[in-house]
Image (tube, rainbow, N blue to C red):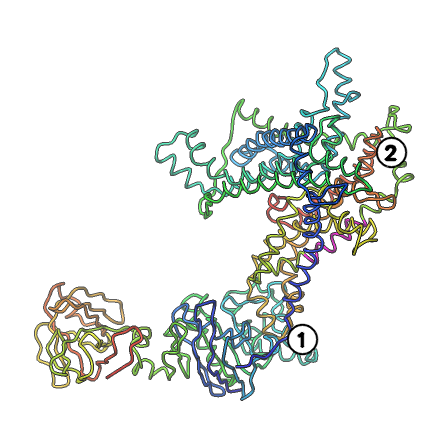
Amino acid sequence: MASVEIKGIRKLYGDVVALSDINISIPSGSFFTLLGPSGCGKTTLLRTIAGFHDQNAGRIEVDGKSIEGLPAYRRDVGMVFQDYAIFPHISVRDNVAFGLKQRKVLASDISKRVADVLEVVQLGAFADRMPHELSGGQQQRVGLARAVVIRPKVLLMDEPLSNLDARLRVDLRAELRRIQRDLGITTVYVTHDQEEALAMSDTVCVMHQGVIQQAASPLDIYLRPENRFVATFVGACNFMSLSKEGGQFSLKSSGAKVFDAAGFNATEIACAVRPETLRVASGHVTPSPEEIAIPAKILDVSFIGREMEVLTITDGGEQLKSLARPDPAIIELANGSSVTVLVKRDDLAFFEATEVGRRVG
Amino acid sequence: MIRQLRRPDFWTVVTGVILVVLVVLLLIPIIRVLLLSFVDADTLKWTLGNYVEVFTRNFYLKGLKNTLFVGFLGTLGACMLGIPLAFFTARFHLWGRAWISTLAILVLVSPPFIGAYAWIMMLGSNGFITNFFGRIGIETPTIYGAHGIVLVFTLKFFPFVFLMTQTALMAVNKSFEDAAENLGCTPLQRFTKITLPLVFPAISTGAIICFVLSIADFGTPAILGRGFRTLSTIAFSAYRSELGGVPTMAVTVSMIMIAISMLALLAQRRILAKRRYASSLTNLPVKTHLTGWRNVAVHGFCHGVVLIAMLPSLVVVYTSFLKTNGPVFVGGYGLESYGRIWRTAPEAIANSFLFATAAVVLITAFSALISYVIVRRETTASGAIDFMMMVPYLIPGVVMAIGFVTTFRSGFFGGIGAAWLLVMLYFIRRLPYGVRSTTSSLRQVKPSMEEAAINLGAPPLTAFLKVTVPLILPGLIVGSLMGFITAINELSGTLILYDAGSITMPVSIYLAVLDGEFGLAAAHSTVLLLCTGVCVYFVFRFTENRNSAFL
C-alpha cells in the first residue's frame, strides 16, 4: 500500500508530445483509472510509472520517495499486461513464482505464497498446467496473481480485459475489483472502455492528446463533466445550436431562453444534453415550468430490448437522440409523425464550442 | 531540472560490444582491401593504376567476361530447373514430394566443390561415364571449361530458386487465380498474367542468390577451369604470386567481384521496390491430380532433376569405399581411403570440427544478442548492425580472407595464429545465418514477455536468459546448425589463411583433387557429407517451415 504522486511529467517522442505536464495524486489503496481514446497517452503514462521508458521532465513519487533513477526491475510495481505476457515455456506455478525467485524469497515461503495467491484468483487446481492449456480469462488471472504475489507497492494494469470476450470481461471486472479491495493495493488501471472505468474506479482520469481533461469520481465525471471532451467521450451527448439576443442565449429549435452570458458569441457556446434525459411525447404537449418543449418529427425508432432509441429531427433540421424505457405508443409511431421532445432546464450543459472547451454553465 | 546520470544500461553496452566486433572483424578488413586496391605495389603510393590494369589487360578482362558468362548461364540454368520444379511440386499431387524437397535441401547444403570433382570422376578424361561411352565408341564432351562450370552451378544452385518460388507459390491466395478465371482468363493466361507476376519477387530473389554465389564460387572454377579463369581464381592466384609483397592486384580483382555482387543486389532491390504483395492466407491454393503422359513426364522431370543433382554426392560416397592403392583404384571395395585420411591427416578432421564448433559457439551467442538489439532496440546503432548483417553475403570468401591477412597478419593485430583467424573468419562470414534465423524467431515473441520479467524484478540479462532465450531457442538452434554446416564446408577463405597446423577437410579435399587422389578426397567428402546430413536432420527437427530454414 502506497500513495502515488505524479508531478509535472512530460514525455516527447521526437516533436510529438505524448504527455504534457501530468500532475496526479493517487491516495493509498485507491483504484485510479486512466481513460481515453487510443493515442491519448494513458499507456505511455502507465509505462512511465513502470519504468519502461524515461520521462523528459517531472518526477514520480511512491510514498513520498522518488522512484526516478530506479531501473524498471527495481521499481517494485506489479504490472498486468493487455496480452497477458504469461511466459509460455514454464508452468503456471513457475510463472507466479518468477518474481519471488528474483527477490530471493525462501523456497518454502514461495510455495506457500504461490498456493495462496492461486486460491485468491481461483486457479488453485491449475498450478501445474502449462499456459497454453489455459483460456484467455484464466491466463489473465495468472497475470494478476503473478503481479500481486510480489506484494508490490503499486499495481499497474494495461487494458487487462480488452482481449477477452464481452461476458467474461464483465465477470472478471468484478473479480479484479474484489481482489483489489481485499488486498487494498493502490492500483492504476488503463482502459478505453468508459463502462469499465465507471464501474471499477474510485477515481476516473480522462485523458486526451497527452493532457488530463478531468480526474474525479465516476459520478462527477458523468454528471458534472468539466469540459466538452469529457462530456462526449464518457456517455453520449446531443448538441443543440443556440441563438443570441441581448446577452441571452436561446435554443434555436424552441426559442426558449436557456443561458445568460454576455461575454460569448452564439457560435462559441455549445449546448449539450444526455439522450436519457430527453422525453419524447406524441403530438403537441405543453411543458411544465422547468421543462422546454421542442417540436420535432420521428426520424427513426429502434427498439433494443430494455430501452428504445428514438431519433428525431427538429423543424430547424437538428437531430436529437433520446434513450428511454420502451413505450409502445412511441415505438408504433410512423416515421415523420409529429412529436414533442421535452428537456429539463437543469439537464442542459453549456461548453465553449471547441473540442476540449470548458464548461461554462 | 537536473537529470540523474544512470549507468549505461545492459543493452547499450551489448550494442557497443557488437559494434566493436563488427567493425574490427568486418569493416576494417573490407576497408583495408578497398584501400589496398588504390595502392601501387612497388612504390606504395596512391594510384588508380590497378584498376586501369584490370580494365585494360586482356587477362583480367577475359576473367571478368568469363565470370559474368558462367554467372549468368548458371543462374539461367538454375531458374530453368528450379521454376518448373517449384510449380509442379506446389500445384500438382506428386508422389514423393517430401523426398524431392529433402534432396533439394541436401544439394543446397552439401559442400560446394564436391559437385565439381564428382563430375570429373563421371565425365572427366578418365571418368566412368566417359570410359563407358568410349568403349562403345561414342565421344562424350569434356567436363572441363565453361560448360562444365555452368552445369555444376546449375545443378548446385537451382534449389535456391526452387525453394523460394515454391514457398511463394504456396502462399499465393487462390482467390486471385479464381478471380482471374472468373473474369475470363484461360488457365495459361491466368498463369502468365496473375500467378507468375505474383511470385516474381521470390524468383528474382532466388536468382540473385544464385548469381552472387556463382560470382563468388572458387572451388568449381578452380577444379574444372583448366585455363578458363574467373575473377575468384584470378584473385586467388594473384594473391599466391604476390605473397610476401603487397597483394594489390588480388584485392583490386576482389573489389570488382564485390561491385558485381552489389550491382546485382541493387538491381534486385529496384525490381522489388514496386512489388510488395501482402497476402492474407484466407484461401489456400489447391493441388490437382495429373493423369496420363503428363503425370509421367512431370514425375520424371522432378525426380530426375533432384537425382541428377544428388549424383555427385552419391558418386563421392561410392568412390570412398572403392579399394585403392595409393591414388589408383584397383578394383573391388575397401576402406583404404578412410585408413589413409586417418593416418595422413587426422588433424584435418579434428581441425574442421574444432574450428567450426568454436565459430558456432560465437555465432550462437552473438546471434542471440544481435537479434535482440535489431528487433527490440530501435536506434541508429541497431539499424547499422542490421545493415552490416547483409555485408557478409556480398563478400566472397577469398576477399574476406585477403582482408583478414592484410589486417591481422601485421601491425597492431600481428601474430594472431592461423587457427584463430580461421575461427574468426568462419564466425563473421556465417554470423548472418544465425542472426537471420534468430531474428525471425524473436519477431514472433511479444515484447511484453521481457517487460513482464523485468517488471517482476529480473535485471535485463536475467530476463533475456530466462525468458527470451528459451522462447527463441528453435530459431537459435536452426541458425547455429546452418552456421555449422556452412562453416565446416568453407574452402576459399581457408585456402588463403591456413598453415600446416590448421589444415581443414575442405582444403584436404581440394589438395587431394589437384593431386588426382580421388579416393582420399572421396573419404574426406563423405565425412563432411555425413556431418552435414546429421545437421540437416536436426534442422528438420527444430523447424516448422523446412524451406525457409535453409535460405
**Magenta segment:** B354-366
Task: Identify the residue position indicated by label 1 in the image.
Answer: A101
Q: Using a 10 Å C-alpha cutoff, classify the residue at mark 2 as few (fewer than 14 neighbours), some (14 to 19) or many (20 or more).
A: many
The image shows residue B300 at horizontal and vertical percentages of: 60, 26
- Secondary structure under tag 2 reads helix
- Give me the C-alpha separation between circle 2 and circle 1: 57 Å
Residue B525 vs residue B394, the one in the foreground: B394
Q: Position of residue B528 (x, y in %)?
A: 78, 40
Q: Is residue A312 toward the left or the right of residue A136 in the image?
A: left
Q: In which quadrant will I find the N terminus of chain A?
A: bottom right
B359 falls in the magenta region? yes
Q: Inspect the magenta stretch and tell me whether residue B282 lies in it.
A: no
Chain for numbered disc 1: A
Give me the residue at 46% from left, 65% from top.
A163
Compared with residue B487, is residue B115 higher up or lower down, i.e. above or below? above
Dividing the picture into quadrants, the one containing residue A128 is bottom right
Measured from the top left, where is residue B232 in percent x and y? 71, 36
Mark identifier at residue A360: none
Q: Nearer the viewer, residue B451 or A193?
A: B451
Q: Quadrant of residue B102?
A: top right
Is A333 left or right of A231, judged from the image as shown?
Answer: left
- Main SS of the magenta part reads helix
Task: Point out which mark residue B337 bears.
Answer: 2
